[in-house]
Amino acid sequence: MKGKVREEIIMTTLLVFREQLKNFYSKYELYLTPVFKFLLALVTLVMINSSIGYMSELKKIAVVLVLALMCSVMPMNFIVFVAAAVTLGHLYKFSMECALIALVVFLLLFILYFRFSSHDTVAVLLTPLCFILKIPYVMPIVMGLVGTPFSAVSVASGVIVYYMVGYMIGSASVLNTFEDDGALEKFRYIIDGLIGNKEMFVMIVAFAAALIVVYFIRRLSVDYAWTIAMVTGALLDVMILLFGDLMYNTNLSIIGLIVGSIVSVLLAKILEFFVFNVDYSRTEYVQFEDDEYYYYVKAVPKNAVSAPQKRVKTIRVPEKAVGQQKRDGSK
Amino acid sequence: MLNEERIKLMTKMACYEADEGRKNVAIGSYFRGDYIGLQVIKSIISATIAYVIIFVMYIFYDFEVFMADIYKMDLLQFAKSAIINYLIFMAIYAAFSYGVFTYRYTKAKKSLKTYYNNLKKLAYLYDRETKKQG
């Protein structure tokens, strides 16, 4: 009983915190969004530089900061563009052939896919980042929760980009053994390696399946649909990856998979609580005119001031707790 | 005199136009056939570029074999199969984009319904105002 009370108190505190966060965000949305974009761009660039930093010019702090600052004021997709360009730059310094293949992959993605879903583009960027952070399993779950079944293509593209760059860097020593005029052999070696990368294909299948399952379950009209979707998605993901490991011997770290999946579900749960289920409806600044006036309107959402509601909850819960504590004390 | 009701309506509409409505308003300015046709043509162009890239990569991958065989093989047959593959690829991609953009157009039109209603309401409010003044 005490545990339950404590749980409820924690829940109330969290809800209050979320409310404050929401108020804070809707108040300073104008400044917070660029800051978030800047941080995302910075993290992305630092990660790219630390994992494939072959071109020293791109690794300079000034360059990184300027690029990140540019990203903060540009649309979200610009970060993806910058990340792709920086990756290509590093790969070009590393080996021309690698850069060419990467360029072709990026171009094909851009031409064929991003015509359809420009708002999903950031998933292509986030998937490799999550891979580097060892929690790639969070991507299908999160994209299934917020995206559409087509997001599976974005996540799959992210997986391809990660494995492609990883394979290129991983085979640096082999590529160096080719002669200078062995461009064709290098080219063939990399393409063979990419097409023969079973781990990548198993990952793509697992992620796509998990994402689609998460999407369909979270749309069901049952209680806790989101939580059920997360857990089912993660389980399906684990099962397919384990099965793939058995079939093709993909050298999967099973402990990493299980721990990563648990962490991913927890992360998705946290995101659900703080991000997806909250309407961060923001203050809008619009301007328009009629025959007589120019209007510069600042529209503040009304729900941003709902502080009194919380108090009701905190009072109700401790009532029980106090009674219980008294009884416990008299014993 | 400021008309509060009208300003509220205009603000709502401006918010819609600035946010989710921007794309929808752009889509809504086309006729159905024009919009979908234009998008499918764009898709066909994209598919063509993509196919050329893939084809060049394929030749490049097997460059040595290709160069050695170039006098032996039936070039006409090769070209024929390349073109057939291209047509299949393009047809699938175009059909897919036709589906996607038809769906998008319908959705945008639906979303614009409220917006158009608000426009009518706005016109009515204007009308009333001018009548009052006149």
Image: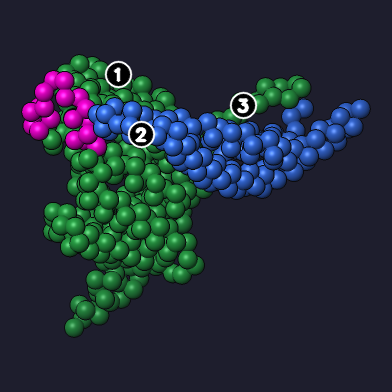
Task: Return the residue nearer the eye: B70 or A151.
Answer: B70
User: Where is the C terminus of chain B found, in terms of image quarters?
Assistant: top right
Labels 3 and 2 positioned on one and the same chain: no
* Element type at mark 1: helix
The disc numbered 2 marks a residue on which chain?
A: B
Q: Secondary structure at mark 2?
A: loop
Disc assigned to residue A66: 1
Amino acid at dot 1: Val
For residue A279: magenta? Answer: no
Q: Which residue is mark 3?
A: A287
**Residue drawn 34% across the image and 58% down it:** A210
The chain identifier of the residue carrying mark 1 reads A
Residue, disc 2: B73
Q: Which SS class for mark 3?
A: strand
The single residue placed furthest to the bottom in the displayed view is A331
Highlighted magenta segment, given as a residue range:
A173-191
Within 10 angstroms of label 1, few (less than 14), some, or many (20 or more) residues?
A: few
Q: Which chain is home to disc 3?
A: A
Q: Nearer the viewer, residue B34 or B68?
A: B68
Tag in front: 3 or 1: 1
| Residue B119 on image: x %, y % | 75, 38
Contact (CB < 8 A) between labels 3 and 1? no
- Residue A60 horizontal side relative to residue B86, left or right: left
- Residue B26 x/y as whole percent: 63, 33
Write the residue at 37% across / 38% down: A122
Report the mark closest to the observer, 3 or 2.
Answer: 2
Residue in the foreground of this view, choosing between A128 and B21: A128
In the image, the chain rendered in blue is B
Which quadrant of the figure has residue A5?
A: bottom left
Spatial distance from mark 2 to mark 1, Cα to Cα? 54 Å
Q: Which chain is green?
A: A
Report the amino acid beneath label 2: Met
